[in-house]
Image (cartoon, rainbow, N blue to C red):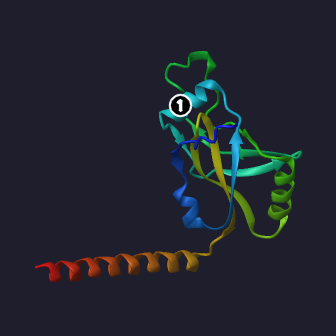
Amino acid sequence: MADNKKQATKVVAQNKKAYHDYFVDEKYEAGIALFGTEVKSIRQGAVNLKDCYCSIKNGELFVVGMHISPYEKGNIFNKEPRRERKLLMHKREIMKLGGLVAQKGYTLVPLSLYFSGKNVKVELGLCRGKKLYDKRDALAEKQADREMDRRMKDSHRSYED
């Protein structure tokens, strides 16, 4: 019998800028090839996903621009903070994503970095770029929701008094 243990997920970093700049159409999960000192640095939360993206080269998927700070106790084993890191996915999925990215306006963006059990995983988003007016609409909608919540909370308080 196989043990079906649920693996705990601990989110280390999120790319909130991606949700501001892109429409996320689909989400995918990928492993990432790291060195030991990089994993230790990620456990300390020293990672930045801002301004990073994914590229496909020779049938392999890479994340470009992800900054993982050097581990303080790593000395000679530390790697370049912004080096390209290989993402681990099935060849079939990579080819499918490659076809979608080749279409007009699609890009692969890392949305979050998390631990699934002891493994580091990356959540990728298949994204379309937002225009400036889309960003304004999203901001206006967010402010309207916030204002509505505030008013509902105030009206609820007046009933309790």
Q: Looking at the image, how many numbered discs can be counted on the residues?
A: 1
Tell me if 61 is positioned left or right of 53 in this view. Answer: right
Tell me if 9 is positioned left or right of 55 in this view. Answer: left
Mark 1 Cα-neighbour bin, 10 Å: few <14, some 14–19, many ≥20 = some
In what quadrant of the picture does the N terminus appear? top right
User: Which amino acid does the dot numbered 1 rest on?
Assistant: Ser
Tell me if 137 is positioned left or right of 105 in this view. Answer: left
Nearest the viewer among 122 and 79 is 122
Give x and y (percent) for residue 122: 64, 47
Give x and y (percent) for residue 142: 44, 75
Q: Quadrant of residue 125?
A: bottom right
Residue depicted at 75% across the width and 69% down the height? 105
Q: Quadrant of residue 107?
A: bottom right
Q: Residue furthest top?
A: 76
Compared to residue 34, the image places residue 27 above or below, namely below
Q: Residue furthest right?
A: 58
Q: Kindly identify which residue carries mark 1.
A: 41
Compared to residue 31, the image places residue 41 above or below, namely above
Residue depicted at 57% across the width and 78% down the height? 134
Compared to residue 63, the image places residue 160 above or below, namely below
Residue depicted at 50% across the width and 37% down the height? 46
Residue depicted at 88% across the width and 47% down the height? 59
